[in-house]
Image (tube, coloured by chain):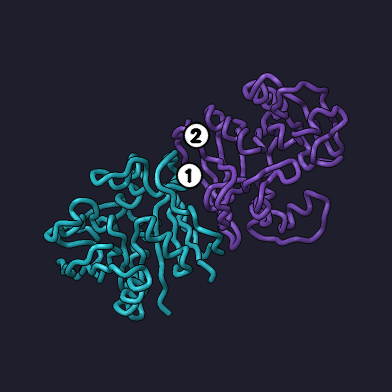
Chain colours: A cyan, B purple
Amino acid sequence: MSLVRSQLSISLDGFVAGPNQSIENPLGEGGMRLHQWAFATASWRAQHGRAGGEQGADSDVVKEVTRGVGAYIMGRKMFGGGEGEWDPTWEGWWGEEPPFHAPVFVLTHRAREPLSMKGGTTFAFVTDGIDSALEQARAQAGDQDVAIAGGASAVRQYLRAGALDELYLHIVPVILGAGERLLEDMGDPTLGPIRVVASPAVTHVKYRVLH
Amino acid sequence: MSLVRSQLSISLDGFVAGPNQSIENPLGEGGMRLHQWAFATASWRAQHGRAGGEQGADSDVVKEVTRGVGAYIMGRKMFGGGEGEWDPTWEGWWGEEPPFHAPVFVLTHRAREPLSMKGGTTFAFVTDGIDSALEQARAQAGDQDVAIAGGASAVRQYLRAGALDELYLHIVPVILGAGERLLEDMGDPTLGPIRVVASPAVTHVKYRVLH
């Protein structure tokens, strides 16, 4: 049975982005600190066509979270929202060969033609809501899983709708003090930890959402 | 070298107590859910003179956090603040044989005589601030550690003052949605995970605070 899953780096005080997010600084002030652990890994570097990097538990987790994903869903800001969104030649933030290598469904209010990028990533723009996006993503993913890639708001919507099966949090020992929270206005979903991977940099905890 | 350490149960969304804390309900609405994992353990039950309970990782953690503690510091509300505080015969919330079995220093604004309880717990009331309490606790603890027992506000004060060496968080997969946060108005201390214990109920992560 194919799962709907999501994975996010989160600060110890619960933020997935720092304050004052903007087009120029989509992760907000200090938000990049949540992702340094991943950038340092050999797996992340390999996925982005670079050599080197650290082997170990964190690198294994980076590999694990991309394995078995047949389609992605993301919010418009994660695709490349803001001004550029209104430009039909704008192809998002991910460069000519995005790291997804799979169909990506972008939640947006503005219809546009799909994009085919190098390396097997396609972006399709879904204007009729999260259920429709999930249905389309499932159809493309087949036996594989659907990943809600982000941002936090997309993950929250699927979690709140009871559509998320797994939430994998990379708990980074950083205190941001302000920014965008993941688990806010969320109701009271029942979660159970099913996997914990510890490294000196991050504690990775995978939760099953019990429906 | 003796350490200053603290351990707290915290919800996945960062709360150490639920909303609407009161004398009748000091943990706030839903706050008790953060502690069920501990109550279920054999170690907790044994510390409170009861038989039975579950063995395993959580029980081991309960044992671990009390081991090697030579003195405690707590806020007045945790001792038994509120109305009772002004009653010189009020001996707090902990019963005639409190589970500390060690000297306890209570941060308060109201001087009162120390209390000697059954089982080796003494309560001394410190009116001249957190540094003084720590100094007195260290003197009593000798080679053993000083534990900041809580509540969250006392832990925050020591963390903010750079006086805390270890923070052991029991991350409970519960979303409270509101209540008292631990890591708020905290500045940006440097933390590193030094120990992770996983159970189906809780993820225990011990952080070293790097000064």
What is the secondary structure assignment of the residue under circle 2?
loop
Residue A69 or residue B67, whichever sits in front = A69
Relative to B49, A184 lies left or right: left
Q: Amino acid at mark 1?
A: Asp
The residue at 43%/42% (across/down) is: A174
Relative to B53, A200 lies left or right: left
x and y percent of residue B169 in the render?
57, 46
Host chain of mark 1: A
Q: Which mark is residue A13?
A: 1
Residue B72 appears in which quarter of the rendering?
top right
Q: Are marks 1 and 2 on the same chain?
A: no
Q: Let me know if residue B168 appears in the view.
A: yes
x and y percent of residue A150 in the render?
34, 59
The residue at 57%/47% (across/down) is: B15
Q: Amino acid at mark 2?
A: Met
Q: Which mark is residue A177?
A: none
What is the secondary structure assignment of the residue under circle 1?
loop
x and y percent of residue B103 in the render?
76, 31
| Number of residues whose C-alpha sits closer than 10 Å to that of mark 2, classed few (under 14), some (14–19) or many (20 or more) | some
The residue where tag 2 is placed is B186
